[in-house]
Amino acid sequence: MSTRLFGEPVARREDGRLVTGQGRYLDDLGHDALAAAFVRSPHAHARIRDIDVSAALDADGLVAIYTYEDLPERVRDPLPLLIPHPALTHGRTAYPLARDVVRHVGEPVVMVVARDRYLAEDAAALIEVDYEQLKPVVGVEEAVQGAHLVHQDVPGNVGAHLVQEVPSPGGAGAEQEVDAAPHRLSFRLDIERSASMPLEGRGVYARWDADDGSLRVYSSTQTSTSVRMAVAAKLGLPLPKVEVIAPDVGGGFGVKIVHPWPEEVLVPWAAMLLGREVKWTEDRREHFVASAHERAQVQQVRVGFDDEGRVLGLSVTILHDHGAYTPYGIIVPIITATQLLGPYKIGAYRVEFSSIYTNTVQVTPYRGAGRPQAVFCMERTMDKIAAYLGRDRAQVRAANFIQPDEFPYDQGLLFQDGRPLIYDSGDYPESLRLLKELVGWDDFHEVKAEAARHGRRLGIGIGCYVEGTGVGPYEGGHVQVTSDGRVHVSTGLTSQGQGHETVFAQIAATELGVPLDRVSVVTGDTRRFGYAVGTFASRAAVLSGNAIALACRKVREKALRVAAEALEADPRDLEIEDGVVRVAGNPGAGVPLATVAVLSNPLRYAFDEEAVRATQFAGTADLSRPPVDDGDEPGLEGRDYYSPVRSTFASGMHAAVVETDPDTAEIRILRYAVVHDCGRMINPMIVEGQIHGGVAQGVGGALYERMVYDGHGQLLNASFMDFLMPYATEVPYIQTAHLETPSPLNPLGIKGAGEAGVIPVSAVIASAVEDAEGIPVDRMPISPSELHELRRTSRR
Amino acid sequence: MKPPPFDYHAPHDLDEALAVLAGTGGDGKVLAGGQSLIPLMNMRLAAPAHLVDINRLAGLATVEAGADGVRVGALARHAEVERSERVAQVQPLLRSALGHVAHPVIRNRGTVVGSLAHADPSAELPAVLAVLGGSVRVARHGAPPRDVPAGEFFLGPLEPALAPGELAVSAFFPAVPPRTGTAFVEVARRHGDYAMAGVAAVVTLDDDQRIAAALVACVSAGPVPVVLDLTAACGRRPAASTDWAAVAAEVRDRVDPDGDIHATAGYRRHLTGVLARRALRIAAAEAAGEYGWTDER
């Protein structure tokens, strides 16, 4: 690898385009398309008695109105349950347009197509839906009583129930170990709802080519390949006649991995039916009430431990609020249940969760996907153990760490991919050492005491996590060197701003020995690469990164083989540097990759000077062999796939210093420190950017964001005025230190980094506020008003 | 999130604007900065049949700071008033409060008079006008303009004393008197959000440096800015020996805020007390010249 770009902090190549308004997002496309708008349920739970569209029929610019009754076979079926699981005994998904019953505010009931979005909304406002209101079910604890049901055939509103149990080395169960432990604690924890809330909402734009019988769909999605399969199946089209493209996507954070959304089926269907281009762009109000939320859980914890704070038994019971439907299965609570143990070696563990239906927006993964709740549970537990024993919180954690010589470490659980949860590598003691140094952990008591002398209240908090990243089943990469020497890389998974154009190019440039500017990257376009899973679970770099590297190695091998013939050298003596294949140690003898590409593709027709060299009368061919050898292919290109045997486990530890105002109860983050280990870093600047973004979202979840439902199932804060995402002014400066413990599982030794930053933040801030205030903090997020009430009720 | 249909009017002078407004039959809204109105229309929470855009009325884009006070025209943006050194000299409370109004991009478009006419009791500027005893000049077609004192202008949440067809053409903020200090403090959930609680304070000292007058206006503490005269509570003592905690407690006890999803009523009441104490102390210190500003005025 002569061109050392892997590991360099290369500036993001996509930024120039994106920050100067050159990005092409969904709503930038299809200016002449018809616009769709939806009539959505204003009620959390109601039966549809009648839909009266008559007043809308004369609306200016109206093209079509569709209700459930208008939908044909397959399109009218319930949306797919994407990830079935044996424990999900009562999985339920929505119809694309409500059939008889609506189960959350925002559920689509009628689709309107008109000349533009203004007119579509005007027409939608004229449609009268007569509802019979049903009793809404809000809040898991009310729901699980089962007095009223979200789905009439789901008793107790329990969609799924799962127990995983890991006995102690001695064979005892967790409850038994807790009972037998020298010390025991039990407590309840609460985490509220938030949401992915990307800057760009969802959106679909479909073009039907009647002459060609083909459909092109643009979708602001995290998986174009799977949307393609879903749309082809729903509309009964041959797969090769459907193309799906994810254009520039303004953030996903999980919500756009769900598919097909109702609109992703209905908009292409309407485009085919009408023979016109149709587009729907989600607005913010719709995103709040008609996409997905996450996070809400109630956790009951029992823990038993020894004098050192070592956990002998841990038993956690979780009520997981799943909202009205389960299109993404029970991935979120499974991740909570299985990632809860973090970097710790626990005596015996039992986790039980019930996934509960409520008349609220469905719950699907949002960055972190169940892990913030898991880490909140484990780290609150560690803090409570330390408080109980009067020991240093970091020390208690260290006493429970898995040690560096214990990898691979089998936690004895089944992970979200159905495979054993085995940590591949890590160095938790070293991470803690770095973190303590970075944040000044050991001297903090002096800082705190000094501040107290000036009437200021400071606290420090800590949180550790381990994150399973890079889940399968696979991703692929395709690399083609064209006769101009350019390298075209494509992979099927999609990009939402992560910097794939940069990091995948760094990998290709490094593997092929070409300058970065010679490499271009395409993602999420089924015209370029048809096989893919999608972008989620911190998997893009691990899966596509390795697949692209493997594809590049195929290209490199062929380039060396072809060049060796041209140079009459042994391929083993060749190297590629700056785009030229040369004999190592002999800078004079070389052949550019452009020429190798020409020679790799025997031609009958010359179309430029270069091509002449590859034509049949050029006199360069070995006439005893066919122009293309058996088993070989024309062209200098390669395709390969990476399919991991199981996930690779990144880890990290965060610490924060907060100040709470003794009078106003305002909470200010003074310092935030991160130690992060995602194996080998392709680009440390991009890793840090991911961490910064993650911490920013974590600060939102810890101090600002919640979905406020009232007892009627109305979302009271469905706008950016009242759903408080942190501004830059609320996000602290973030200090980072990196540890690079390579993964032994993949050729590049990398682990995922996309979700990491958000995972421990709620736990860390709770820990710090608790330290500042001396009051247990068991519910997040926490606002000044809530801290004030906590102070009052604890009579401080 | 697209507005329902409306007729758009773009008059070129005040007379035309007033005539157009008069012709809208009470179903017209005035568009100046649009920072509150346009989101309300996009969410279809407001659906005026007519929108009268006054942005071509150059005569209203004025900020005049004189010895007696600051007159702000209906097209003067927050940012312009905030940045004006002359305004800061004549009435420093404006600059203190404007720094809390939303974000710079909003202040670049939003107007001071628009904020007043929106009459949101959570907003900063109504409290400033109220505590200073300023006024709003209101024009209507075929009648002379009238000045409405702040105390009569804010009738309820989002309810200014503007009849259909009327246009608020300017607002007047009296100058800060001698030996007087002002302060504006608030606590919002995020930087730039509407305040959970906020207090504008004006404190005047007599020749012996004792408190001669103390007035606060509380934000988010009632349906309109809540103005409280605390002169008696201060007991005509020098600032240093005034029992600010007791004065603030009076403020806390006299406001009656509502709770919402961001803060309970109890917390808002508590916070109003805390902020009253802070604002009064700052204003009193400023009045005493402790910050070295008084002489320059």
Image (cartoon, coloured by chain):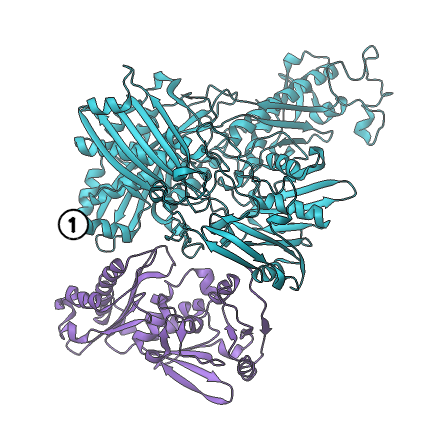
- Please tell me which residue lies in front, A708 or A383: A708
Occupied quadrant, residue A309: top left
* Image quarter of the N terminus of chain A: top right
Residue B152 x/y as whole percent: 34, 80
Q: Secondary structure at mark 1?
A: loop
Image-based side of A56 in relation to B263, left or right: right
In the rendered view, would you say A20 is above or below A492? below
Residue A460 x/y as whole percent: 26, 40
Q: For the view shown, which residue lies furthest in the bottom direction?
A: B143
Q: Circle 1 is placed at which residue position? A: A795
Image-based side of A709 in relation to A766, left or right: right
The mark tally for this picture is 1
Occupied quadrant, residue B159: bottom left
| Image point (27%, 14%), residue name | A170
Q: Residues within 10 Å of mark 1 (few under 14, many from 20)?
A: few
- Please tell me which residue lies in front, A609 or A690: A690
* Residue B236 at least partly seen: yes
Q: For the view shown, which residue lies furthest in the right direction?
A: A617
Residue A279 x/y as whole percent: 64, 50
* Residue A311 at least partly seen: no
| Image point (38%, 73%), residue name | B87
Image-based side of B62 in relation to A662, left or right: right
- Please tell me which residue lies in front, A251 or A319: A319
Residue A114 x/y as whole percent: 65, 57
Which tint was used for chain B?
A: purple
Occupied quadrant, residue B11: bottom right
Which tint was used for chain A?
A: cyan
Give the letter of the chain under mark 1: A
- Please tell me which residue lies in front, A541 or A783: A783
Q: Amino acid at mark 1?
A: Arg
In the rendered view, would you say A202 is above or below A434? below
In the rendered view, would you say B96 is above or below A549? below
